Image (cartoon, grey):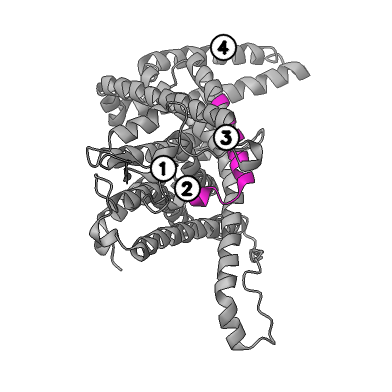
Amino acid sequence: MQISQCPLYLQVILAFCWVYIRKYQSRQESEVISTITAICALAIALITSALLPVDIFLVSFMKYPNGTYKEWAANNETRQHIENTVLYGYYTLYSIILLCVFLWIPFVYFYYEEKDEDNSNKCLVNLTLLPVFPVHPSMHLAHVINKFPLCLADGLAALSFSISSLTLIGMLAVITYTAYGMSVLPLNLIKGTRSILYERLENTEDTEEVEHQIDKLKAKCADGRPLSMRDRRNLQDLEAKLQVLRRQGRHLEIAERNCCNKVGSALRPMKILLGVFFILVALLFFVTLFISNLDKALHSAGISTGFIIFGTNLTNPLNELLLALQPVFPLDYVLITIITMYFVFTSMAGIRNMGIWFFWIRLYKIKPQRTRPQALLFLCMILLLIVLHTSYMIYSLAPQYVMYGSQKYLLQGNHTAAITKICDADAPEDQCTVTRSYLFLHKFWFFSTIYYFGNWAFLVVFLIGLVVSCCKGKKSVIEGEVDADDSDFSDDEYVH
């Protein structure tokens, strides 16, 4: 199929992924297979994140605002068919994520590592296949066919468990990167960057000072006497520092001539307004998630049920906002889509600012035009894991809306006419359809319990990130472009 035949939204997603990957990709270390893998993985993450708003829209679209089913959805079999289609959509996209995380991305990663080291050994990928279809060779075909529905059900249960297990890793990524990204992204927009002219002046002064110190140390051995061990060590440190300062000077000179920085300075007021908006959204999410977790702590059946509650007992601002926007189509769907994309993009900002870490060890840095292919693959893998946990985060923010969308039902009074009510846990089962996302999230109570405590950890990390981001000063205009452990090779790549 040609690209021109793809739906418009797919073309937009693929175009964004291509631009994003190419922006950070190293020009001299790029590989076709790693580039295609990173673009496809990022596109899968964005497409999967959009499935929750579609799920909510479909269950809401089945009913009129007065609470009655539309003609095409009046038949229970039709509704069941639509619900199963959405459920299989979840299974399909989540299975693709499993394939990417366990097979595709690791294969490309180790393939590139092997090629990078000029090693001719083939990369072997060991797959653990679940015994989904336990068919014995001696069984007849009729027995196999009769057993197929049961095996399929077991296979879907195994797939659900695998996805839920992988979502736990996504929860850790959300706590680490998304929580930090929600604080650092708006504050960086508000504070802006330091003045290029001031930075160049400061760089010149520091360079002259280091050169002066180097000259003083070299003067000690002008008469032929060798330097002491301490002086030689100081000289090496000063020469390394001078090299970094000179590279910073070259980058600052390039940044001063860069048209994008000049346009960014002109758009400074807009960035401040955008930063204020983002920090207000982040604080709204913080308050809403705190109230939601507090509601579960006070009114749920406890840890043995996964802290599940039906409906809301405390006023949830975001849930109330979504319900209030229901009469104005399609504002509530637009808002839930924006919330979903907000989580994805703040996660990308968190990864970009922190880099990729394994506990206290930094594995890779994310830098414009100088990010290694392995780092981009890790970035996309982390985003895939984050997307898996995003649905639960949004459910925690707006539980009633995620369960039923904008559905309403008719409540028949004893001596009065029927009244229209918003669907909640007290609604008759045949009057309100629960989203497939909600059912998918609560298949295993023990995972819900872990997610609940993960939400508290998310709130703590967000507060820590907010305090750290407030205490830090303005970023350099070349923040992250020059570090002491970077090579001159990467510097030359950037300059050219």
Q: Nearer the viewer, residue 440 or 130?
A: 440
Q: Nearer the viewer, mark 4 or mark 2?
A: 2
Q: Nearer the viewer, mark 1 or mark 4?
A: 1
Q: Nearer the viewer, mark 3 or mark 2?
A: 3
Quick check: marks 1 and 3 in contact, CB under 8 Å?
no
The residue at the point 33 percent across, 24 percent down is 277
What residue is shown with label 4? 212
Q: Amino acid at mark 3?
A: Ser
Residue 214 at x, y percent in the picture:
61, 16
Quick check: marks 1 and 4 in contact, CB under 8 Å?
no
Q: Amino acid at mark 1?
A: Val
Q: Quadrant of the N terminus?
A: bottom left
Q: Give whichever of discs 4 and 3 has the lower sequence position.
A: 4
Q: Give whichever of discs 3 and 2 has the lower sequence position.
A: 3
Q: CA distance from mark 4 to mark 3?
A: 69 Å
Tag shown at residue 300: 3
- Badge 2 marks a residue whose secondary structure is helix
Q: CA distance from mark 2 to mark 1?
A: 7 Å
- Point out the stretch of residues depicted in magenta: 438-460
- Left-right relation of 149 to 492: right
- Badge 3 marks a residue whose secondary structure is loop
Dot 2, how many residues are within 10 Å of its Cα: few (below 14), some (14-19), or many (20+)?
some
Q: Give whichever of discs 1 and 4 has the lower sequence position.
A: 4
Main structural element of the magenta stretch: helix, strand or loop? helix
- Badge 4 marks a residue whose secondary structure is helix
Q: CA distance from mark 1 to mark 4?
A: 65 Å
Quick check: marks 4 and 2 in contact, CB under 8 Å?
no
Q: Quadrant of residue 78?
A: bottom left
- Left-right relation of 93 to 405: right
Q: Within the magenta stretch, is there residue 478?
A: no
Q: Residue furthest left?
A: 328
Tag shown at residue 402: 1
